[in-house]
Amino acid sequence: MKLLKVHSVTETRNIIDSMLYKSWDYFEEIHAEESIGRVAFENIYSPIELPEHTKSVVDGYALKSKDTIGAGESMPVFLDVLGQIEMGKGDDIEVKNNTAVYVPTGAIIPKGADGVVMIEYVENLDENTIAAYVPIAPGQGLIEKGDDIKKGDTVLTKGKRIRAGDIAVLCAVGIERIKVCKKIKLSIISTGDEIVDSFGKVKKGQIRDINTHLLASMALESGADIGLKILTKDVFDDIKRAIEESLEISDMVVISGGSSAGNKDMTVNVIKALKKGEVFVHGVAVKPGKPTIIGKVGDKAVFGLPGHPASAMIIYKIFVDYLIKKYYSMEEERILIEGISAENIHSAPGKETYQAVELLYKDGAYEALPIYGKSAAISKVAKSEGFIRIDENKEGIRKGEKIIVELF
Amino acid sequence: MKLLKVHSVTETRNIIDSMLYKSWDYFEEIHAEESIGRVAFENIYSPIELPEHTKSVVDGYALKSKDTIGAGESMPVFLDVLGQIEMGKGDDIEVKNNTAVYVPTGAIIPKGADGVVMIEYVENLDENTIAAYVPIAPGQGLIEKGDDIKKGDTVLTKGKRIRAGDIAVLCAVGIERIKVCKKIKLSIISTGDEIVDSFGKVKKGQIRDINTHLLASMALESGADIGLKILTKDVFDDIKRAIEESLEISDMVVISGGSSAGNKDMTVNVIKALKKGEVFVHGVAVKPGKPTIIGKVGDKAVFGLPGHPASAMIIYKIFVDYLIKKYYSMEEERILIEGISAENIHSAPGKETYQAVELLYKDGAYEALPIYGKSAAISKVAKSEGFIRIDENKEGIRKGEKIIVELF
């Protein structure tokens, strides 16, 4: 396949959608309690109604609402108390005309009753008689059977990342085990003659590996599992072997290369040299991140990211994280924060510019501070809390301008 | 200790600070790669400078800047090429007057050079001679040793929740193992005569346990570990035994009770009946969540939360999560989103009101939809993405009003 022209982010995502997306049919069945942070594999429907029975939402007396018509402060209605419903017990009493049954909050409303008068509006005349000083409308003071959740209601939506509130609802309807997306296994290859193990000895001119750890950590945040982590020299056969080994156990491979042009072409050539290897994108019109590569080997996605960590971070987010979430059918999960630009921000003419920013909360508003640094600077990578996108037709951002920051 | 009056959130937090906060001196030492999501136990300082040597940030020729004075498009300067620096290799060449050395991006700048001219501005006349068509300022095209990170610079701040970018920086300076806060162990007790195991049989009038799972999941999100999860009836001795067992293995206990007033007093009385048991707060001026209890047994915090899941969720967030993050010395981690209220929202006069909302992103702005429901409704708990705070002196929020939403 011939190399294509340099693409915009939208064009690139369209290529990802058409060439790399596939239905992700892999799931695990796990206990609801252990599902926090996982992604729902399918819609889950309630097997029951909630509440399962009509219940009181106040401490009071269940009664027939018609018996309270005309009740007022100066003219109470008098009702015989038949007994009480205990919490957690059934309703073995029936409310008849001009009678009432005590119900604590959450107790079942006994047969015959259609409303509850709160104890605050009641006077206990003797053990068996109350005076009610307010009229009660039908349905007042209670929640009807099924009013909260109906049988068949969706209690968890396919593609949702499960949070505490979702688990609460699953438990409320008694769903113990659920299917969650099996995690995508992603392998990471970092290449570069100068790159050495982060924690070993470093000779003059060598630099510690950053991208393997950065990208592995970002992949964990995306909800992926890590397969292999391989560090190689910029040698064709080494990179080829690294990709082959990775593909054996992974669903996706992310290669981050040295920054030289020669190196980038090597990665493209290695992918094309692999059996069923194709490259769809070589170069995106994004600052930073021009040397991005997107291809596949068989049906497994292979990404080539820029070597510089700050660029790799943004390209990972806009393309790799994008595809992972697409596989999981995840609903939009971006958090967008409105902020004020703390400085003038330059953009590259004719290219979409993505600029990492730090956010400062000041006087009730966020100030977004662009994070610059010579292309070798990595100290600011940790400070990047989000990024802004500047359209290719816009000439930068002025200090004080309103901007939208997407959180990392 | 006598029961105190009903407190505002600020007063309650002050009580938490003075009565419950203690320095959290427990840590684990783990591999930097495994630290994602954990909280830094101490400041970490860089043991090295970064870059460790002055490096090129472009592909070009390292030279003495003074040799390029006066260079221009029509009048290049001519330099003898002495060789090249390879990636990952030392600088065994010295640049002398009117000479240059080829340096790829990231290569060490050889001795004698103080600038780099990009290859784009250079013509190769023969193998050993180049013509440079631009003047180069001292420092141009390179990053000085230590310009990114200085020895002793803070590369991770005590109390920071570790993200991918932090791990990148640790790896860049070769820090392999770091101290993270040992997780606080939190036990959860749910009480109520009507509450039964979420996944077992449910008789008429009984309801499935929600709060144990909701609060355990929220505690995981706060960065705590779960100790015991106990479901008890509203029986003094049962609750007492549950707290005693929990305290044996936990740092903190969260009890969520039935909604009746009698039940709440029982929890207070149980805490006070325990050896070294004290109650500081019984009732907060917050809607929802009036029946909140805060106390301690020995030096371990004990919280009593409202029985209704939606209320328990908010009270957990504003008091329990608050204390956990205080223990970890965590920096402010709230995410605040500006939104427009989609409806009129009522507040309780004289009380701070916390209202859970769902967020809808529409036309470039967030709309916050208040989540109502009779007090027994739990279907909306999963939809609560954040909450707004309405001041006790403010009479609700009008539809269309700007509001600040704190994300759960």
Image (spheres, coloured by chain):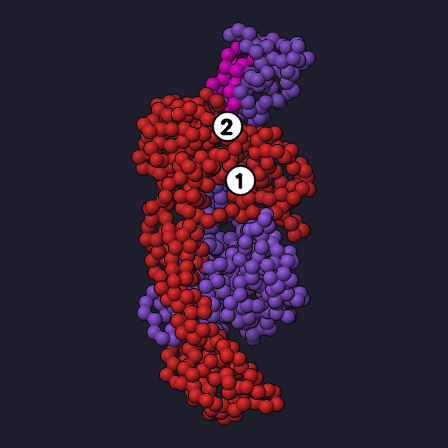
Chain colours: A red, B purple
Instruction: State whether residue B144 appears in this view.
Output: yes
The residue indicated by pointer 1 is A382
Q: Residue at x 46, y 31 (%)?
A: A305
Quick check: B226 above or below A379?
below
Label 1: few (<14), some (14–19) or many (≥20) C-alpha neighbours in 10 Å:
many
Specify the amino acid type for callout 1.
Answer: Ala
**Residue A51 image point, x, y percent:** 42, 70
- Label 2 or label 1, whichever lies nearer to me, is 2
The residue indicated by pointer 2 is A6
Label the magenta part by its dominant secondary structure.
loop
Q: Is residue B95 magenta?
A: yes
Specify the amino acid type for callout 2.
Answer: Val
Q: Is residue B404 magenta?
A: no
Q: Residue at x 40, y 43 (%)?
A: A327
Q: Residue at x 57, y 31 (%)?
A: A351
**Residue B405 image point, x, y percent:** 58, 56
Number of marks in the rendered image: 2
The foreground one among B89 and A363 is A363
Which range of residues does the magenta coloring cover?
A: B81-106
